[in-house]
Image (cartoon, grey):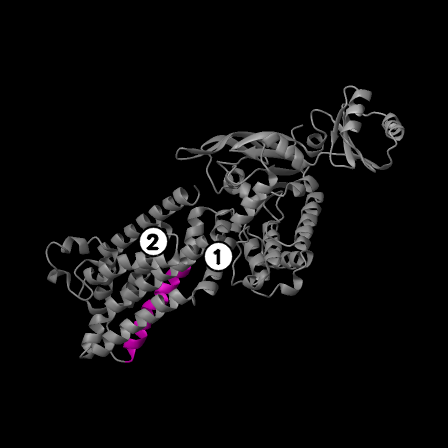
Amino acid sequence: MNTNIIEVYNLSKQFGDFKAVKDVSFSIEAGEIFGFLGPNGSGKTTTINMLTGLARPTSGSIRIAGQDGIMNIKRVQQIIGIVPDESNLYEDLSGFDNLVFCASLYGISKNNRETRAKLLLEQFGLADAGNRPFKAYSKGMKRKLTFAAGIIHEPKILFLDEPTTGIDVENARQIRKLVKDLNNTGTTIFLTTHYIEEAERLCNRVGFIVDGKIVHIDKVENLMTGDEKEYIIEFTLDTHDSTLTKSMIQAFPGTKVSKIDNQKIRIILKEKTDLAPFIKFFEDSNKLIYEARIIRPSLEDVFVKITGIEIAKMKKEKDEKK
Amino acid sequence: MNQAIAFMSILMKDMKTYYLKPPNISWGIIFPISWALMFFARSESAVDSRGILPGVMALSILFGTTSMLAVTITFERKSRSFERLLLAPISLNLLMLAKTTGAIFFGVINAFIPVLFASFMVDLSGINWLAAFFGVILIAVTSTFLGLFIAVSVSEVFEAQTFSNFFRFPMMFLCGLFIPISNLPALVRPLSFMLPLTYGADVLRFSINHTGIIQPWISYLVLLAFSFGLFLISTRNIKKRWIY
């Protein structure tokens, strides 16, 4: 049975001579958190805009919850929620009035929208600030209220564009928890972020987009294990030098060994191996072993490896934009 | 029902939030009141005051509605809160009607401010109030959609105000309010008949002073055609420029 709630085929968007999104195809299963990762200008926001009805695709097709996402966009908008990358609620309205207003756009009755607004203010820790105008909110509070406005009508699918950018650690943690809680209730989440560790923590699957093209899509666990199935073990010794590295390569043919610093040495294996011979080798070489640990590649490492884009540069670009 | 809830909510929010915004107060309220007072003060007789009433009413509507739209659309577009409305499950036509209805009300209210002033100075008997009221509504609708057309064409509130004046001030002098169209140079006269305010002001003159030069039903039809055309162009521009 097809459980895909979003299906995108050969989606493209052209602005004059510039092709912002190039024949992108992907699908998202109901109930999953899908992360869309890529640098500035890679086509993430344009893709979200096409999926939510804020931009018209040049070519391709979109199906959302069985509906044609281009022809029947107004029906689709009834079941999707959007949290944009900027808090765009009404500055002069209070937090409560903003939520009530957003609920009314989905045709929710007065009593129901007021009840829902109160509930969300409570859930997002904003109950005390409910009567304050939006302009008096801190950046983190604004972000949380914008999030609450995105789910006021209990959407089946939530599009989150950079939900934690530019806010403090505590508020970012709260938002991540809210994303997880929401997903646990069955909401499908489409997330774009440039915080790779955030995607690693939250997403079931991620897609990397560079220059308008999806270069890789996979489950986070598969990406972390990698295609090459490498097992990296890092030993911390009292001290070592290049002679030890050379003799290790001779003693364990086919094993990659690299010196990290004067104490740390990394052994890269093709399969899980008994560590006893390595420990014996260090003991025979009169080395003290302080620590031995398995090194798992982070999603960040995988992203850099696949896309060739440095994360620090990507973050800097985003923060400058903000 | 869902659409009606959204429509009413957008309308009420705009009225609550924007009626007293600075550009509306200065251009939409203070300016027409000043005009009204200035003309009434300069009138040498009660007959004169009644003679200029249609013109002052038409200008109050024009300035009130176009100022309101410059704020409700351009301001929200700038702050990106307008995106929230475009992403809501309501049709673009209904959304734009909801955004403009508040301005139409504002224009109608503005039209009766000069009437209120005049009522203290002039005998207002013999006015065809029904015809005047229809005229006021149609001028308000046309001016609002002109404001919408302007608001959709710019990106800053000050640009909207400047661009509005580009239409408002020439209309003031070419629509026959202060200089009769027959007294205008022959070359300029056709231009007067291309402006919606000419027909609106004429309807008001007809219903207030019985001195109009165009049959009221023709003016009503022309105003309706202007309204429809401006709304159509504006929504097309939104689809083209904002849902890119």
Is B219 left, or right, of A301 in this rendering? left
Residue where numbered disc 1 is placed = B10
Would you say residue B108 sits in the magenta stretch? Answer: yes
Amino acid at circle 2: Ile
Residue at the spot of label 2: B150
Label disc, if present, on residue B159 of the rendered structure: none
Q: Nearer the viewer, residue A135 or A59?
A: A135
Residue drawn at (23%, 72%) of the image: B126
The secondary structure making up most of the magenta span is: helix
- Whether marks 1 and 2 lie on the same chain: yes
Question: Secondary structure under badge 2?
Answer: helix
The chain containing the residue under callout 2 comes to B
1 and 2 marks in contact (CB < 8 Å)? no
Q: Is residue A254 left or right of residue A21?
A: right
> Which of the two discs, 1 and 2, sits closer to the camera?
2
If you read the primary sequence from the N terminus, does the residue marked by circle 1 or circle 2 appear first?
1
- Residue A238 in percent (x, y) is at 83, 38
Residue A36 appears anywhere in the view:
yes
User: From where the camera sits, is residue A84 visible?
Assistant: no
Q: Which residues are magenta?
A: B102-120
Please tell me which residue is depicted at 46% across the width and 60% down the height of the picture: B14
Q: Quadrant of the C terminus of chain B?
A: top left
Callout 1: 10 Å neighbours few (<14), some, many (20+)?
A: many
Q: In the depicted view, which residue is nearer to us: B132 or A5?
A: A5
